[in-house]
Image (spheres, grey):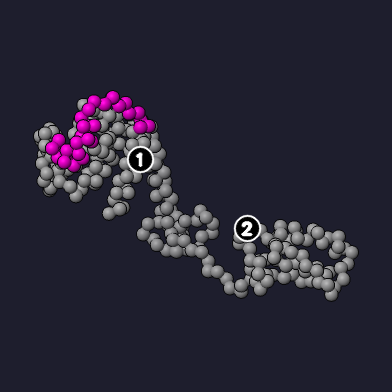
Amino acid sequence: MRCCEVLHDPKTPISPWVRTIRPLLPPLWSALVCHKPRWMRRTDSKQALYLPNIGGVMIRSPIARTGTLKPARTRKCAVKGCGNRFQPRNMTHKVCGPDCGAVFAVAERQRLDAKQTREAKAKLKTRTEHLADAQAVFNRYIRARDEALPCISCGRHHTGAWDAGHYRSVGAQPALRFHEDNTHRQCVPCNQHKGGNAIEYRIGLRTRIGDERLEFLEREHPPAKYTIEDAKQIKVEYVKKLKTLISSR
């Protein structure tokens, strides 16, 4: 049944004034009462609200009347360590009382100040600093990817610190700086104390990725000129990859 359908009781005659105002009743009732979206309206006759028969016209509204009230919606206090639940007055009401409101205001001010400081520092960052941030995230991803593998050079499971070692160095081939085949998990003694241990690195790399991909790394590549936007995009990409890798374990 449609919203605000006007029905006529055949037993009651229709007076002239009702005939005049009858076309105006459905839109008027719809404007006053039927303000809910169509998908929220209840139209079954058992739960419909019937107005009294006025002058032979009966207006039926699809507002549901179940006879039971829903429990009030509650929200957890936004202050850490409080945990109390309260009934919010509006969508922006986040704390349970004045004491928590004062604590929340101080914390929110500190959060906004820290955000403004980060944004100001980000604007002052140079291209080199953006590349360093992207390289740090890329290196974390490589170490997480090869976590179960031994050192690419010496083949042992080192118990100390690990690096993300490049087969072709960043200075020699900048285009391979963020290439995953060119970077593998390498122990600190091989990467830092032995200058990368390139000979053993090549042997381990050939076993791990094959001759074809190794030949690609060893050929000459055009120099790469990373911009600040490139560095930001690389950082975002490997942050997502790192999160996906960690969550899949």
Instruction: From this view, report whether residue 127 is shown above or below residue 85.
Output: above
Instruction: From this view, report whether residue 195 is shown above or below residue 9.
Output: above
Residue at which label 2 appears:
37
Q: Residue at x 33, y 38 (%)?
A: 235
Residue at which label 1 appears:
236
Q: Which residues are magenta?
A: 201-230
Q: Report x, y in % for residue 201.
A: 14, 37
Question: Residue type at mark 2?
Answer: Pro
Residue 99 visible to the viewer: no
Q: Nearer the viewer, residue 83 or 179?
A: 179
Q: Report x, y in % for residue 11.
A: 84, 75
The chief SS type of the magenta part is helix
What is the quadrant of residue 129 in the picture? top left
Q: CA distance from mark 1 to mark 2?
A: 40 Å
Badge 2: residue crowd in 10 Å (few <14, some 14–19, many ≥20)? few
Could you tell me which quadrant the C terminus lies in?
Answer: bottom left
- Residue found farthest to the front: 212
Q: Nearer the viewer, residue 197 or 128?
A: 197
Q: Residue at x 70, y 62 (%)?
A: 3
**Magenta residue check for 202:** yes
Indicate which disc, 1 or 2, sits on the residue closer to the N terminus: 2
Q: Nearer the viewer, residue 131 or 116?
A: 131
Q: Is residue 204 left or right of residue 30?
A: left
Could you tell me which quadrant the N terminus lies in?
Answer: bottom right
**Magenta residue check for 220:** yes
Q: Residue at x 76, y 71 (%)?
A: 52
